[in-house]
């Protein structure tokens, strides 16, 4: 029976770019999940009898939140929910299921790479029918509904057990529990030459893929080991755990430092890779060579045509503004457009839907294509494998050949985490005021060619986004970019992105810190980082 229960609004149920993210104890308050999900449905129209895809990254509270969501979806009139077995769906797999089933939308339960567990983070994100994150006008409507909510509708029958594959009735709605991997794997088999990758592994190629005790474990086990023949044990931390074994499921040089050490060993695997909590980020390290996400985007874009799914070539490349300009050189050489968007995957959706871009990427370990509307960690690993199998070269050989052909964009990101917001804002304001005076100025060997506060005009829907980061561009192609993080939870995080272009292959083997040293020093001086943040050095360098 459908119950209508009275409620009162909670403060702060405003979804960010990646949905509503809060600490687990906040989500566990009575009516908190109910209120938010009812607000999502109240902001939408026309879903009666339609399909909703539901799944999460398996973190603590995943099952409870999903059970509640199913009962609310049934009471609100959805005809069918498609749920990953055990409540699991990686974010890209959820995006694919929404598209494949022609669903009205989907609910993804995840806080991405944030820590999990009882005191960790939790999140709920709504994705629309194209499989991508809801645009701002929908997330703002959800927030609006959450502020005036007086009741929610809930089916008083219990939700079906999430572990049994099959169809179950919940009031007037069908709950279909599906294998979370099967459809995603079938999609990957259309994009990549699985026989060629199988032959690569049969020839002794070694991979270590760290699923970080998060959602990609079952996907990687099935695809890499069971289907493609990677040696058993190639996938480590393969069981999704509610607390990710107490680790931070973020595949970067800090939280996956052990993979770096493994890849640098003389007898290390040919490829070390990892994904994050919900499976959309990726880390790629070849034996002896870490591939920056910006370089990875450029290499994948330059070589994608070897994979069956991209044989016809790619229509265009899109990268977020702070991502290095390595991809721009590929786009120029191939005479295809390059789109420079603000930070965040949501800006790629329109370009992908319109067929303007095929491959997209961000410097923050996100790469993907038009196969779904989210970034996709395992997709990036499989495309690398297909390229390695086709070219019969090592990761290091492919990357070095790429630098020789296109030049090398030395690149680093310096994060100053949790600095006082006041100082961070003052730094940005001071620098913004100084921008008009910079062009033409010389700093040692560097001459400023241009400086601006990045703004984006979406060529598809005509929308404008301003204040997306401060750029200082130099005549030799070097660049310093400053922006404040939009995903932090405490204080402010200043991100400084530093890049230098080096065309000469004889100078492609410098340590990054050395290659960038003059720019790093200048980045500190121009923005007076020490004075504004009180920090002499960044907290994280990636
Ligand atoms: C960070 C990354 C950005 C990514 C986002 C969500 O955002 O920099 O590229 O899209 O997380 O994963 P930021 O904290 O910089 O706003
Ligand atoms: Zn993620």
Image: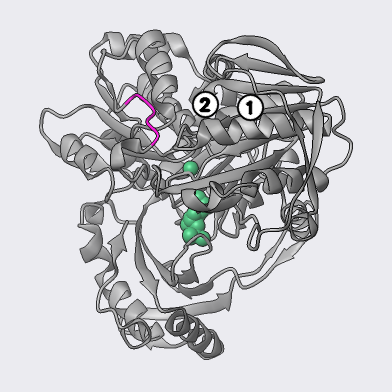
> Depth check: 515 or 148 in front?
148
Q: Main secondary structure of the magenta part?
A: loop
Q: Nearer the viewer, residue 257 or 284?
A: 257
Query: Helix, strand or loop at disc 1?
Result: helix
Question: For numbered disc 2, what is the local secondary structure?
Answer: strand
- Name the spot of residue 347 as percent of width and height, x first: 65, 52
Question: Split into 4 quadrants, where in the image is the N terminus?
Answer: top right
- Which residue does the image show at 49% across and 37% down from the upper left? 61
- Residue 78 in percent (x, y) is at 80, 28
Q: Which mark is residue 354?
A: none
Looking at the picture, does residue 192 appear above or below residue 67? above
Say if residue 283 shows up in the picture. yes
At 46% across and 72% down in the image, what residue appears? 482
Corner quadrant of residue 271: top left
Up the image or down, 316 lies above or below 416; here it is above
Q: x, y percentage for residue 464?
A: 74, 65
**83 inside magenta stretch:** no
Please say if 415 is above or below 228: below
Residue annotated with mark 1: 96
Which residue carries the number 2 mark? 88
């Amino acid at each position: 029976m459908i119950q209508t229960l009275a409620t009162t609004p909670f403060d702060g149920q405003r979804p960010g770019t990646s949905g509503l993210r809060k600490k687990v104890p906040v989500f566990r308050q009575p009516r908190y999940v109910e209120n938010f999900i009812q607000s999502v449905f109240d902001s939408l129209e026309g879903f009666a009898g339609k399909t909703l895809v539901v799944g999460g990254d398996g973190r603590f509270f995943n099952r409870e939140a999903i059970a509640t969501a199913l009962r609310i979806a049934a009471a609100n009139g959805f005809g069918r929910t498609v749920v990953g077995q055990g409540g699991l769906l990686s974010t890209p797999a959820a995006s694919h299921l929404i598209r494949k089933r022609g669903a009205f939308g989907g609910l993804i339960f995840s806080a991405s790479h944030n820590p999990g567990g009882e005191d960790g983070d939790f999140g709920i994100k709504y994705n629309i029918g194209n499989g991508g994150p809801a645009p701002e006008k929908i997330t703002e409507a959800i927030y609006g509904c959450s502020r005036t909510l007086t009741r929610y509708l809930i089916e008083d029958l219990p939700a079906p057990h999430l572990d049994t594959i099959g169809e179950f009735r919940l009031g007037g709605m069908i709950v279909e529990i599906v294998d979370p991997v099967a459809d995603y794997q079938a999609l990957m088999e259309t994009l990549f030459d699985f026989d060629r990758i199988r032959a690569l592994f049969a020839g002794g190629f070694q991979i270590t893929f760290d699923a970080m005790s998060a959602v990609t474990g079952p996907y990687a086990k099935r695809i890499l080991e069971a289907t493609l023949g990677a040696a058993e044990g190639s996938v480590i931390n393969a069981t999704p755990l509610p607390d990710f074994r107490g680790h931070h499921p973020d595949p970067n040089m800090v939280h996956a430092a052990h993979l770096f050490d493994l890849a640098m060993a003389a007898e290390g695997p040919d490829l070390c890779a990892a994904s994050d909590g919900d499976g959309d980020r990726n880390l790629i390290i070849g034996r002896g060579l870490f591939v920056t996400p910006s370089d990875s985007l450029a290499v994948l874009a330059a070589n994608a045509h070897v994979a069956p799914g991209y044989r016809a070539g790619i229509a265009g490349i899109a990268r977020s503004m702070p991502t290095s300009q390595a991809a721009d050189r590929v786009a120029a050489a191939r005479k295809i457009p390059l789109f420079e968007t603000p930070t965040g995957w949501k800006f790629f959706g329109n370009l992908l839907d319109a067929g303007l871009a095929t491959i997209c990427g961000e410097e923050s370990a996100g790469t993907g294509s038009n196969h779904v509307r989210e970034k996709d960690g395992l997709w990036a690993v499989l495309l690398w494998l297909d390229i390695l199998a086709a070219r019969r070269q090592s990761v290091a050989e492919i990357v070095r050949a790429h630098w020789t052909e296109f030049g090398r964009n030395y690149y680093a990101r310096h994060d100053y985490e949790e600095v006082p917001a006041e100082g961070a804002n003052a730094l940005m304001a001071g620098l913004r005021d100084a921008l008009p005076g910079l062009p033409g100025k010389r700093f040692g060997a560097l001459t400023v060619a241009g400086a601006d506060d990045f703004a984006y005009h979406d060529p598809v829907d005509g929308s404008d986004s301003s204040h997306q980061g401060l750029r200082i561009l130099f005549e030799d192609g070097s660049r310093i970019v400053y922006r404040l993080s939009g995903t932090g939870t405490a204080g402010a995080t200043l991100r400084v992105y530093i890049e230098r272009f080096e065309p000469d292959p004889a100078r492609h083997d410098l340590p990054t810190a050395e290659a960038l040293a003059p720019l790093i020093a200048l980045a500190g001086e121009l923005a007076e980082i020490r004075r504004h943040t009180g920090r002499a050095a960044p907290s994280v360098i990636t």
